[in-house]
Amino acid sequence: MPIAFYLIQMEPGPYSITNKQRPRHLDTIRANWSGYPLFHFGYYLCQVNTTATKHTGLADLPGVFPFGDYTLDTIVGDMFPADRNRLRTLLRGIGMELYTDETVEELIHRYICFSEWELTEENRDDLVGDVPANSNALIHGLGNKWGIPTSNIETLRSAMGKHGPKYWNPKKTMVGEF
């Protein structure tokens, strides 16, 4: 079965044992998935493993943003222009830039860090010490939690490169649910 990456809105709350905080639509189409919750944005970043027919149907549902048919090591600049433009529009809507020299995996890790650190705008060349105080505290707090030393004089790009892979590894083996 093919694997693809998506941003999918979370199921609406309130959450409970019977209404778990999960990506929308995946239970309905009975797809196997792994993912990372981006609470700051109300989305899940998902790796979905299902049939080609279900992928096509999922991509057309509301609240679903497909990343396209790319591997993790694809350079963003090598993506089809239409896909790059969709990504650029999505990212600018939350204050992020699309950098064409990074891989899809680096983009995923940057997106996760952007959410975890509650940033509202980002330039990967900014220094950690120059971000708002609450974001700086999150960067250092999560760094301490995961054993990742982070300095105020390093760039966000450097910090994201160290933090992102610790938060979620999109290469991990997915455990099937159905």
Image: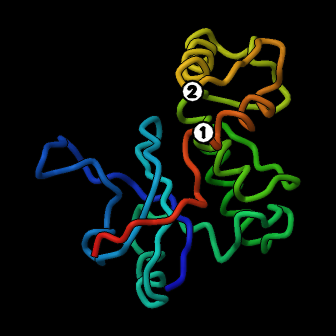
Give the amino acid at mark 2.
Trp
Whether residue 38 is situated above or below residue 107 in the rendered picture: above
**Circle 1: element type:** helix
Please name the residue shown 31% across and 68% down the image: 25
Residue 133 % position (x, y): 61, 9
Please name the residue shown 66% across and 54% down the image: 89
Residue 165 % position (x, y): 64, 43
Q: Which residue is nearer to you in this view: 73 or 93?
A: 73
Left or right: 45 with respect to 169? left
| In the image, farthest residue toward the left | 18
**Circle 2: element type:** helix
Residue 34 % position (x, y): 44, 60
Whether residue 125 is situated above or below residue 84 in the rendered picture: above
Task: Locate residue 171: give its quadrant.
Answer: bottom right
Color theme of the render: rainbow
The reply to whether callout 2 and callout 1 are in contact (CB within 8 Å) is yes
Question: Label 1 belongs to which residue?
Answer: 166
Whether residue 27 is situated above or below residue 124 in the rendered picture: below
| In the image, farthest residue toward the bottom | 53
Mark 2 surroundings within 10 Å by alpha-carbon count, few (fewer than 14), some (14 through 19), many (20 or more): few
